[in-house]
Amino acid sequence: MYKTIILPLAKQDIIKAAQWYEHKQHGLGKRFVKEVRNKVNYIKRKPKTIAIRYQDTRCVVLDIFPFMIHFNLDEVLKVVTISAVFHTALDIEKWTTR
């Protein structure tokens, strides 16, 4: 299993999305966080099964919510670094500024 680092901006992405969903419906924010956690656990176990989308960045879409987790893999150190959790409708330019 790989060690996982979630960068501060990615944590902010998760918090903002969870707050938005919670505002829409009570309990939905917690469900979003649980979905992210489940996908991160999958990434920790099998990061190489996820395709590279931008240069060295791999992306995986959540199963229920329209969000994509962006991460890089350090095979030598066995570390996954999550840099963003973006809505799939966001402009790619936002991702490239990170």
Image (cartoon, rainbow, N blue to C red):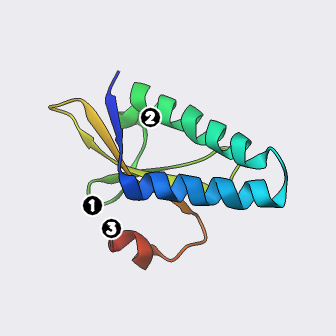
Percent of width and height locating residue 34: 64, 36
Label 1 sits on what residue type?
A: Gln
In which quadrant is the C terminus drawn? bottom left
Q: Circle 2 is placed at which residue position?
A: 43
Q: Is residue 30 above or below residue 16?
A: above
What is the residue that sits farthest to the right in this orientation?
25
**Precedes in sequence: disc 1 or disc 3:** 1
Label 2 sits on what residue type?
A: Ile
Closer to viewer: mark 1 or mark 3: 3
**Secondary structure under badge 2?**
helix
Crowd band around label 2 with a 10 angstrom C-alpha radius: few (<14), some (14–19), many (20+): many
Closer to viewer: mark 3 or mark 2: 3
Most foreground residue, 9 or 97 = 9
Q: Is residue 32 left or right of residue 3?
A: right
**Secondary structure under badge 1?**
loop
Closer to viewer: mark 1 or mark 2: 2
Is the residue under label 2 in contact with that under label 3 (CB below 8 Å)? no
Percent of width and height locating residue 59: 44, 52
Q: Circle 1 is placed at which residue position?
A: 55
Most foreground residue, 85 or 23 = 23
Disc 3 from disc 2: Cα separation = 20 Å
Q: Circle 3 is placed at which residue position?
A: 98
Label 3 sits on what residue type?
A: Arg
Q: Quadrant of residue 76?
A: top left
